[in-house]
Image: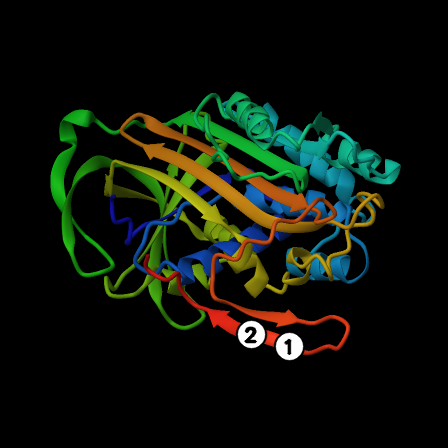
Amino acid sequence: MLCFACIFLLLTLSRAGLGSLQDKQTDFGLKVFLQLSQDSVDKNVVFSPYGVASVLSMAQLGAAGNTNKALTAALGFSLRERGLSRQQRLLQRDLSSEEGVETASGVMVERKMSLEKGYRRALAKAFQTHPHQVDFTKPDQAVNIINSWVSDHTAGAIPEFLASGSLTDETRLVLLNALHFQALWKVPFDPKLTQERMFHCANGSAVPVHMMRLTNQFNYGEFVTTDGVDYDVIEVPYEGDSLSMFLVSPFEPEVPLNVLSADLSSQKIQQWRAELRSAKRQLAMPRFTLDSEVNLKTALMKMGLKDMFNLANADFTRITTDERLCVSKVLQRVKIEVNERGTEGAAATAAIMFSRMAVEEITLDRPFLFLIQHKHTGAVLFMGQFNQPELQ
């Protein structure tokens, strides 16, 4: 796989000031990305900040007590705050009205579980979505339904989001976001100028890549992180000028990218937008395709969201009072292709929630102790530990 160590990719709407909600969603998404990048210092990472912020916002609408407090603290906002639900609806509408961009939110709920009316209203108001009933007692059938929904809303780019076995009969709710993006460069790269060159990876190795080249007027700037690391930013616009790609790389090749990631914020991106100046540059960048699947549970737990993954502590009583729910995993699949003509990207994000009120399977597939007790007297007649099967 292409070692994408010198370029951090960020797709952004070039209209400044989409509102405080979008800034807060961006800041949250960037923090999740930083956690992922710290765990993958020399690996490729591709991620949708908007997707994870959307899915956790849907979870937050159904959270109460300490779970709600933790989600509000991590996200930096609550859609129950005055006016923010409307901002979310307008943001989703604005994105979907952009040519080449489609985003959708979905909720799949166990058909026998009743949702609180307030939660249904909140989902409709903020995300313009209504729950779809699914029979999770047939997990593979439910996987096919969700995969079909994701495929439909990513123009077929992600046909198999969830693998067989991703859901169980304990699954009660799946919160979904799908995002599809396709755009041509404002000025395309000439394929005749694409040449094979060596790319110097973060792990010290060098691999050959197809390097695209374009000489043009770009918005360009040089910046310094709060820790004094110099880097530059070049903006490559898409056709129509409402979308663009920022390419960000440190001056010194030995600087790890997570140093730059740690300095990212919505305010920093606004600073780039304000300070970039038109300059003639020759841009050489790899033609690449990235395909990433990640469970965000570890990253989110490090950000203070442990309790929502714990059945004993999670409080989602605003979703339902039928059963106690918690989040089992937050999955994201992202595909992106960048070539001489433009970019196509697709992302699917899911928060899978479950309850253990269903019959729980206990599998002794690891070492265990055993004791044989006489009930009446309490005498332990035998005991032992089983570490491995005896060879027959």
- Numbered disc 1: secondary structure: strand
- Three-letter amino acid code at disc 1? Val
Q: Residue at x 38, y 35 (%)?
A: 336
**Who is closer to the viewer here, 308 or 184?**
308
Position of the N terminus by quadrant: top left
Label 2: how many Cα within 10 Å (few below 14, some 14–19, many 20+): few
Q: Tell me the CA gap for discs 2 and 1.
A: 7 Å
**Who is closer to the viewer here, 237 or 128?**
128
Q: For residue 337, say whether it is visible.
A: yes
Q: How many marks?
A: 2
Residue 21 x %, y %: 68, 47
- Residue highlighted by disc 1: 380
- Three-letter amino acid code at disc 2? Met
Q: Residue at x 58, y 28 (%)?
A: 146
Position of the C terminus by quadrant: bottom left
Residue 273 x %, y %: 48, 48
Residues under numbered marks 2 and 1 in contact, where contact means CB atoms less than 8 Å apart: yes
Residue 118 x %, y %: 86, 39
| Residue 388 vertical position relative to residue 112 in the rendered view, above or below | below
Which residue sits furthest right? Answer: 117
Label 1: how many Cα within 10 Å (few below 14, some 14–19, many 20+): few
Residue 312 x %, y %: 73, 61
- Numbered disc 2: secondary structure: strand
Give the quadrant of residue 77.
bottom right
Query: Which numbered dot is residue 116?
Result: none
Q: For residue 129, say whether it is visible.
A: no
Q: Residue at x 77, y 46 (%)?
A: 62
**Who is closer to the viewer here, 318 or 283?**
318
The answer to whether residue 359 is left or right of residue 315 is left
| Residue 297 vertical position relative to residue 388 in the rendered view, above or below | above
| Residue 229 vertical position relative to residue 122 in the rendered view, above or below | below
- Residue highlighted by disc 2: 383
